Image (cartoon, coloured by chain):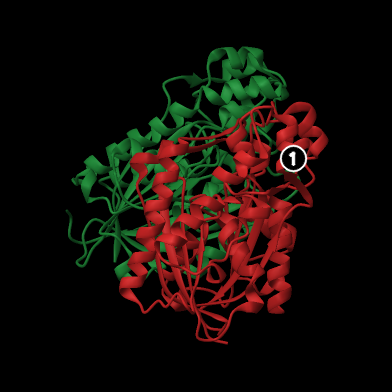
Amino acid sequence: MYIISMGSAHPDGRIDNAFLEEINSTCSAEWIREKIGIESRATSLPLDYIRETLNSEPQVAPSVATANATSLGVKAAQAALDKAGLLPNQIGLLICNTCRPDYCFPTQGQQIADALGISGKAYDVMSACPAFALHMDYLNKFRPDQLPDYALCISTAALTQNVDYRDRTDSAIWGDGAAAWIVSTRKEGKLRVRETFFDGDPLRAAAVVVDRFGFFHQDGRAVRDFSVRQTVRLIKRLESMFSVDWSRDIFIGHQANRTMLEQIARNREVPEQNHWHNVTFLGNQAGAGAPAVLCERWEELKPGQQVVVAVVGAGLSWGSVLLEVIK
Amino acid sequence: MLRIAAVGWVHPAELLTDELLSRAGQVPSDAQRALQWGMRHRYTVASRSFLGEGGIISAAEMKQRFSETVEPLVQMAVDAAKIAIERAGISIDDVGMVLGDTATPIETIPAFAALVAGKLGIKVPAYDVTGITGALPLQIENLRAWRDEAISPYTLLVSGNTPTPYLSFAEGDECSWVLSDGAGAAIIEKISGERGVIIEGARYMRARSEEGAAEEIYGLIRGGGEPSGAALDLIQDLSDELHIEGVTSWIIATPTLRSAHAVGEMLGGKEDTICWCADEGFSFGSTLYRGAEMLLQDTEWREKALLCAVGPDGGVGIVLVRRASIEE
């Protein structure tokens, strides 16, 4: 199975630390930098709207937003199609992950497929932040002859619309974005999939929740500890199964926050130049974060390199993908 | 080879009768109700005060409606899963994977499957594969397409839907008269020898959204309850792919009696062999689980049967099953 192209999209708005300091007296840029390591976040909400309302009624946010899960997903998918030189009618399957669908009916995948003019199957395969691993593991379960020539995977969310901007931690974390990637079992692409893995512990399902008409909330400390420990376990698992050489290979984790990612990279002794991330300037884009990083650095990938993607999130769930750059 | 080992289906206790709906909104004639929609009644998780209020609701009121329905949605699915697990004669620890589906999540993360699995105490991969009305055929089609080693001995499929809190009853549109709340669950077992109800094939597809078809926009479901023409056309294509010759029972999940007969007859069924499984209301993907439950409980049924779902969301799916010559 190969990834033949990728696309990503983010809204133009940016929430920087100075803005958060301005709207919340308990929040300081220094505290954010030290604890979370994020400098700015992509947002679909107008800054004036956040300043005036602190997004106190999240159910109103979609009506003022400049982008949503559908528009971001469409943009990312179109970029992936363009890069691959494919037309929408060549996509036989579209699967979509979102933490915050614009509507639940029809599915988010169906809405994006309709907007792109894709007439093949389209539905949602969802487990929030570990979307990249889930989608790759899900497709990897199929017998190759049961998949179409091209499958389009999308993860999209506009979670800043579910942030309570009176909460200094949540407001410092979240960003909006989408990523899309095209997978084929028949057409060789730049990235060959060596291994996929996905697992979960639903006993801790209540640890991270997005209320559809309310706010995001999580058991922060528990989730942070889980995220670090589980990501390290995922990487160790791949290191024990395959020859991973951190002087050559690349690590991409769940773009939750930079300090957490740095802790993980230090633990596995991944040199800074081989730890790729975008959370510092785009925020936590949920399931879109890790694939968006890979998309942004696509041209830098060199044949012979391996990419370890290890992602965790709500569910609680986690997964990994080992990719090999073949051309 | 896969079989449907067992199915469970549950609904809320509260009945949504024609009389209650009439009080809240427009009043269709008895003949219109019987011929067009054909529902005996529906079920709702919503409190009666919502029905009394009837009309367009504000965002704040909507939030309150939904917050009161989180627990019933998950609990119904948990109850349906427990029934399916018990009927399959397995323990919760035997379940190796949970695939969920809901068109009406109140919490958009975690996955509905994770919420249900968590309440059941199952620590296995649990995520959603959401195809709305066609969810059951979609998930079965996928399992059949997976490599053998990727399929758990027992997979729990679960679908829960509570559309009634999303309705503005005062508008009196078709959706108000056909949608209902409910949850279903099925245990899909991987088998080596033939026994029970064998899955011969499954297909899922979706029709492009059409004007007039039902849709949900920021909390309210509106539009026509009937499947679109494109969705009805698709069902014929899917049945052609599956070669449904020899089918003796047609179990149809469509929002109305009228559309059930249209679909059943299009596929070759006769009036006395078509069973409409939404006579107690249409709850998207959960509805076909009721049909599957009816089929599994029917001891008279022999040979081949077709489970068929066509929804107002454009989701279309069919599952072809046959009873093995060796009973359990």
- Which quadrant holds residue B31? top right
Q: Colour of chain B?
A: green
In the picture provided, is A315 more to the left or to the right than A168?
Answer: left
Q: Report helix, strand or loop for mark 1.
A: helix
Q: Colour of chain A?
A: red
In the picture provided, is B261 more to the left or to the right than B124?
Answer: right
A306 versus A47 height, above or below:
below
Residue at x 62% of width, y 35% of height: B36
- Which quadrant holds residue A315? top left
Taking depth in this image into account, of A172 and A308 the one nearest to the observer is A172
Residue B78 drawn at (x, y percent): 35, 35
Taking depth in this image into account, of A104 and A46 the one nearest to the observer is A46
Residue A220 drawn at (x, y percent): 47, 37
The residue under label 1 is which amino acid type?
Ala
Check disc 1 and report the residue beneath it: A18
Residue at x 64% of width, y 61% of height: A179
The answer to whether residue B246 is visible is: no
